[in-house]
Image (tube, coloured by chain):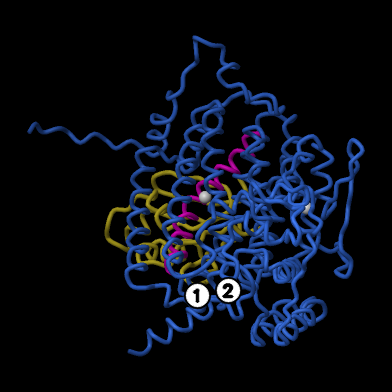
Amino acid sequence: MDTRLEKKKLSLRERYHLMTRGLGWEPTYQPADKVFPFTTYEGIKIHDWDKFEDPFRLTMDAYWKYQGEKEKKLYAVIDAFAQNNGFLNISDARYLNAIKIFIQGVTPLEYYAHRGFAFAGRHFRGEGLRVACQMQSLDELRHTQTEIHAISPYNRFFNGFHHPRHWFDRMWYLSVPKSFFEDANTGGPFEFLTAISFSFEYVLTNLLFLPFMSGAAYNGDLSTVTFGFSAQSDESRHMTLGIECIKFMLEQDEANVPIVQHWIDKWFWRGYRVLTLVGMMMDYMLPKRVMSWREAWEIYGEQNGGALFNDLARYGIREPAGFRDAIDGKDHISHQAWLTFYTYNPLAAFHTWVPTDAELDWLSAKYPESFDKYYRPRLLYLREQEKAGKPVANKNLPLLCNVCQIPMFFTEPGNPRMICYRESVYEGERYHFCSDHCKAIFDHEPEKYVQSWLPVQQILQGNCFKPGTDPTAPGFDPVAAVLDYYELNVGRDNFWYEGSEDQRNFAAWRAAAQNN
Amino acid sequence: MSDVFIALQDTDEARPIIEAILADNPKARLTHSPAMVKIDVPQRLVIRRRSIEEITGLPFDLQRIHVSLISLSGHIEEDDDEFVLSWKR
Ligand SMILES: [Fe+2]
Ligand SMILES: [Fe+2]
């Protein structure tokens, strides 16, 4: 072996420049605007693509190295969890209903993100941005896979885990996250990045991955917390991409400011509405709770989001139009969502319940302004009816907001006794919205949102029955036909937790684990 | 004055990083939650490679933070010696 002099190690900055810049080239067979056809039509003006720099300065070799380490750690935990019957050590089987929502509603979004970033990485110019998008695309595929692997052991023992991919395209409540992401993926690359990297990842995902995943740890779900934090460690890179891309657009041309502001308004509100589900998971579905939705919102929404919008003020960006209404909703949305899901539980692939007395008291303490006044009496009524053997089920299909696709249960800002209704007329048709902000999103692009696939409308139009179903047959039961179309395991996946197979099994297994 | 924050996993590997942050940022406030710690500092948070190395006695590449990192806020400036989060640039 020949002896070589150790060369001086390159600095992080030098390494980053050598390993990203110069990876692209000017096309010669075709003009650049044909190779990159989507970079201008949104109206964003970029003068120098090289001004985008990933502040982490992560290069592909370092990326593979650290991602490989994260994977090894994660799979060791997943293996150990499955091998040691970890599902017996969770706090309570009620907890798993939050994980059902996760695999049904969040994991498919990871896959959409994978596709979205692959698209953005292909269509942006500038190697810095392209490399960052490409890494994120791989991250998101990893999140899809690791979530499926981490959650699938539960499918061997519990209901509601067996058919998430099928449900995602059909089930009424899953159209909320699905339409959110399809809205983003059908935007141009700049809107997509503002929607997902900035509004969703930077401003909002902390609310999902920090308090909720810490909650998973608190409830003994080693598998979920480990994938959650493993995914979130990628998320901090994604958030950085989000904030850098926003700054990049704002610094490149002043004409970009109003376009970006509109996207921030839109995507803050879209993301906030999707997080209603997370609020409900935190306040109602974790038997052991780390913090309330309201507390998490105050830390990550108000303080952290507020700090960010203060900082962006120097570019002429103001806080999102819906920010104040979002703050107003913090005392209400988780309760309103839970009550709605409870009464529609016959149609959902997870269980709901009335909280125990101790849990009601926790909610009263966390929501002193609203819980005893508006929500406790309704929950107590539901409990009474359940005890009397006639749990309250809503058989009417709800009116949905045409933009966020959530049933119209949100109340007026400042008046929690009044449901908030807004509407617009477009080409002679009337469209309904849950809020001023969803209405504003529609009014800006009605051609897009008149195409919304709204589950209720689709059911009423007869598009949610299996082929061969005859709705004119005597004794036709439309609800049963829809559940059949969903391929829901009726009586096992749906209905309330009290009396469910999950509840019975978990009690029996726990008892068996403590005796011979 | 806005805070910046960093959230790290509550693991053996993250412990020297957490210790170094607390030592190098006198205004740091640490919050423990199950499985994680969150550190808030007004305006600016710095992580120094040397401080971590002094605690462990081993060389440390700042990019290893990725393995323990959960989340953060603020603008990032990173080079071989320091990793800085801040609101004012
Ligand atoms: Fe992800
Ligand atoms: Fe809406």
N-terminal of the two: label 2 or label 1? Answer: 1
Looking at this rendering, what residue extends furthest in the left direction? Answer: A1
Q: Magenta span has A230?
A: yes
> What is the x, y in percent for residue A314?
72, 42
Q: Which mark is residue A286?
A: 2
Residue A89 in the image: state x and y as whole percent: 42, 77
- Looking at the picture, which amino acid does disc 1 mark? Asn
Magenta segment's dominant SS is helix
Check the residue under mark 2 and report the chain it is in: A
Residue A67 placement (x, y as % from top left): 38, 48
Q: How many angstroms separate mark 2 from mark 1 (CA)?
A: 7 Å
Given the image, what chain letter belongs to the residue carrying mark 1? Answer: A
**Does residue B43 appear to the left or right of A218 in the view shown?**
right
Q: Residue furthest top?
A: A29
Residue A459: x %, y % from top left: 74, 52
Question: Tag 1, which secondary structure?
Answer: loop
- Give me the chain that's blue: A
Picture colour for chain B: yellow
Q: In the image, which residues are magenta?
A: A222-249
Q: Give residue A219's mark.
A: 1
Q: Residue furthest bottom?
A: A515
Q: Left or right of A300: which side holds A139?
A: left
Mark 1 sits near ligand 1, with its Cβ under 8 Å away:
no
Kind of element beneath mark 2: loop
Q: Nearer the viewer, residue A466 or A90?
A: A466
